[in-house]
Image (cartoon, rainbow, N blue to C red):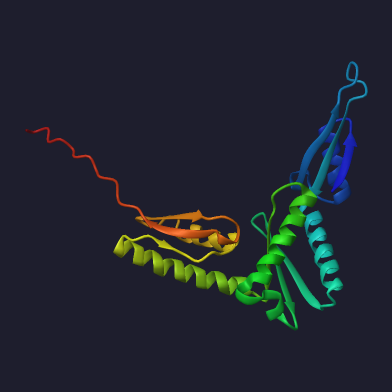
């Protein structure tokens, strides 16, 4: 991530935007040093600045170097969606990249996410998919979550799901977020973290006194 220095933050961001070919609104920055001169003379500010294009370039370079080392030809397509980056990979042997129960793919996601967050010193939502495996997986997870939620509504008995990655837990939290009498909670640590789908009873309503009595 590049560090820029100027007399003021406004000038710094303007310079960075012109160099990167973006607007100031498209920049992310962190001030790392600010100097105050005597009577305003010698003022300066330094900041780390990046744009979404910098994130994309880093992702492409990182994946390119990674797959070159393991001698695997792979197609990479990257899409930016709602402040997140979705990378779809495709190779001659997608099964190896996905791994049993998607564990290899989950490991890829963990490594890339850590590298991106470390480089830009910010939590950035990054997701690797393999030939739309995750897309299909999310569809199945949504269907399963709805089915189990209906079961919990009927039985009023909580259900604990098997451990799953963070992105898959988010899918369940979102799809059941507004369900009546249903609450979802993540429990456990590390690879054992899982979701509990819980029954929540309605709040008792206060009786309105009859003013005619």
Q: Would you say 176 lies left or right of 15 here?
A: left
Q: Is 49 located above or below residue 165 in the figure? A: above
Instruction: State the residue lying farthest toward the bottom.
Output: 92
Q: Is 94 located above or below residue 170 in the figure? A: below
Instruction: State the residue lying farthest toward the right.
Output: 42
Instruction: State the residue lying farthest toward the left.
Output: 213
Q: Is 111 in front, or is 179?
A: 111
Q: Would you say 23 lies left or right of 190 here?
A: right
Q: Position of residue 209 (x, y in %)?
A: 15, 35
The part of the image, by quadrant, that contains residue 90 is bottom right
The part of the image, by quadrant, that contains residue 111 is bottom right
Q: Would you say 111 lies left or right of 3 here?
A: left
Instruction: Please indicate, yes or no, whether residue 86 appears anywhere in the rendered image.
Output: no
Q: Position of residue 198 (x, y in %)?
A: 39, 57
Which residue: 47% across, 61% down?
175
Which residue: 87% across, 42% down?
3
Instruction: Please indicate, yes or no, whether residue 100 appears anywhere in the rendered image.
Output: yes
Q: Is 190 in front, or is 196?
A: 190
Which residue: 49% across, 68% down?
142
Q: Is 57 located above or below residue 76 in the figure? A: above
The part of the image, by quadrant, that contains residue 154 is bottom left
Q: Quadrant of the C terminus?
A: top left
Which residue: 18% across, 38% down?
208
Q: Position of residue 73 (x, y in %)?
A: 82, 78
Q: Position of residue 56 (x, y in %)?
A: 78, 59
**How many discs mark residues in the rendered view?**
0
Q: Is 24 in front, or is 105?
A: 105
Instruction: State the residue lying farthest toward the top.
Output: 39
């Amino acid at each position: 991530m590049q560090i820029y220095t100027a007399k003021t933050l406004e000038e710094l961001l303007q310079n960075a935007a012109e160099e990167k070919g973006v607007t100031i609104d498209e920049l992310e920055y962190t001030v790392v040093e600010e100097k105050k001169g005597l009577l305003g003379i010698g003022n300066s500010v330094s900041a780390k600045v990046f744009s979404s294009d910098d994130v994309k370039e880093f992702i492409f370079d990182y994946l390119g170097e990674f797959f070159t080392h393991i001698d695997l030809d792979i197609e990479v397509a990257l899409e930016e969606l709602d402040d997140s980056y979705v990378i779809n990979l495709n190779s001659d042997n997608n099964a190896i990249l996905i791994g049993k129960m998607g564990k290899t793919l989950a490991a890829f996601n963990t490594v890339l996410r850590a590298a991106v967050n470390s480089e830009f010193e910010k939590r950035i939502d990054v997701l690797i998919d393999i030939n739309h495996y995750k897309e299909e997986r999310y569809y199945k997870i949504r269907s399963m979550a709805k089915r189990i939620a209906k079961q919990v509504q009927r039985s009023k008995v909580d259900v604990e799901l098997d451990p799953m990655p963070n992105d898959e837990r988010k899918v369940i939290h979102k799809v059941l977020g507004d369900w009546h009498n249903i609450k979802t909670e993540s429990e456990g640590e590390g690879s054992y973290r899982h979701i509990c789908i819980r029954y929540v009873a309605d709040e008792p309503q206060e009786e309105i006194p009859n003013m005619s009595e």
